[in-house]
Amino acid sequence: MLDIRRIRLEPDVIKELLARRGEDVSKIDALLALDVERRKVMTESESRKAEQNRIGPQIAQRRKAGEDTSDLMAASTELKSLLVGLEEKVRELDGQQEALLGKLPNTPLPDVIAGGEDKAVILTEPSRAVRDFAFEPKAHWDLLASLGLTDAERAVKLAGSGFVLYTGMGNRLQRALIAMMLDKHTSNHGYTEVGVPYVLSRESITASGHIVKFVDEMYHDEVSDLFFVPTSEPAMVNIFRDEILSGDDLPIKLVAHTPCWRREAGAAGKDTRGLQRVHQFDKVELFRYVRPEDSENALAEMTQDACNILDDLEIPWRLLGLAAGDIAFAAAKTIDIEAWSPGVGKWLEVSSASCCTDFQSRRAKIRFRPEPGAKPEFVHLLNASGLALPRVVAALLETHQQEDGSIHVPAALQPYLGGMTVLEPGQTRWPA
């Protein structure tokens, strides 16, 4: 949530930044007009309270002197009635202001350019040379079928399109990648692993900001009013909700694995073949709570932590700087990591690393004391996929496929597959 004080002081700056996202900046004018009215009513309320406080001693003084107090009593009664109305009006305006603020996205950082998806900037060259094949590389959906790693037809029977049934070695490969990522992030990168609930309350997804833009894409249990996690990010936002942390505790670096559920309603028909876009998938998520002055470096570090996984898997990657109109509602800056998928013939997004500044912590009321006794400040929150599994599997299979249809297993992954060096057809027994 944006700070109303910042909007009062820098309305034109806020408008310019939100315009980069394609937002209707007239919302700021409406918010400021409401704020002026709210402050006017609050001023009048405080004035009437002061007036009432002056009447009290006057009534006591007259009573002590045996004098008539009826006029003062009438005035006090009238003031009490007026104050009730003013306080009710303040609560009403507070609610309206909160609602307007709650619908405004985060402001992009100064180095984030205006525009939408087509304005993304390639920040790096490929991390390694793209493999030159001596044969025509197959797409991952053909490799999944020939290797017996998934059963597409029975997946549709179970849940409909957009879901995956991993079989035998396919599911073992998933587990191996998840374990490898968690081990790398905890042992090498210093994250603490957490196991979060797979469902979240309405309060939690409101605090993280996901309810504003993503509620229609979340799977929702209406009876309990619980939402299946679209990513573990909103869960990790809320771990320290309504708390004041010690500055000595920062940074807090968390990593979690969860399945993720997304309807992907706005992406119907777009990149839906194979594992490119599915409704349920596994993801390892990185998350940090940091001091405001450390958030820029934290974003760079988290991005590199995620890239290190692709390096271990010997998959080429590149970084993309997203334009303001393409970053998430809570983000102030986002860097996408794309892996080269030779069978599909394009770069696939496997991670988004985002700095959300104090936007989510303000909504979730998460603060820290820079030093003992200091005034609490809002922490900065950051998240990054470390990594999302489906497209990593796609890029892995396509990058390391051999002409005979087998898949070379990168050295870093071999210990997690029992020393296996090659995935071959027939390793999974499965009814045709």
Image (cartoon, helix red, strand yellow):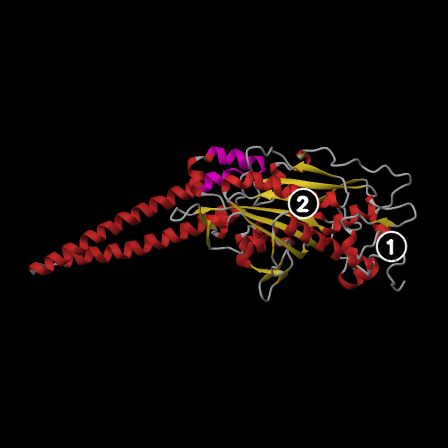
Q: Is residue 111 left or right of residue 424?
A: left
Between 195 and 56, which is closer to the camera in this rendering?
Answer: 195
Label whose residue precedes the other's in the sequence (2 or 1):
1
What is the distance, in whole Å, between disc 2 and disc 1 at their CAs?
Answer: 28 Å
Look at mark 1 in the image and give the residue it sits on.
147
Query: Could you tell me which residue is drawn at 52 percent across and 33 percent down?
Result: 16
Residue furthest to the bottom in view is 223
In the rendered image, residue 216 lying in the magenta stretch gets the answer no
Residue kind at label 2, given as amino acid type: Ala
Residue furthest to the left in view is 65
Query: Could you tell me which residue is drawn at 59 percent across and 34 percent down?
Result: 112
Query: Could you tell me which residue is drawn at 24 percent across and 50 percent down?
Result: 50
Give x and y (percent) for residue 77. 23, 58
**Vertical order, 61 against 375 (above or below):** below
In the rendering, which numbered label is found on residue 19? none
Give x and y (percent) for residue 244. 45, 52
**Vertical order, 271 against 152 (above or below):** above
- Indicate the secondary structure of the residue bearing disc 2: helix
In the rendered image, residue 29 lying in the magenta stretch gets the answer yes
**Is disc 2 in contact with disc 1, using a CB cutoff of under 8 Å?**
no
Residue kind at label 1, given as amino acid type: Leu
Q: Residues within 10 Å of mark 1 (few under 14, many from 20)?
A: many
Look at mark 2 in the image and give the residue it sits on.
306
Q: Is residue 428 left or right of residue 339?
A: right
- Indicate the secondary structure of the residue bearing disc 1: helix
Give x and y (percent) for residue 169. 82, 58
Give x and y (percent) for residue 251. 53, 47
Query: Could you tell me which residue is drawn at 33 percent across and 54 percent down?
Result: 85
In the image, which residues are magenta?
12-31
The quadrant of the rendering that contains the C terminus is bottom right
Q: Is residue 88 visible?
A: yes
The main secondary structure of the magenta stretch is helix
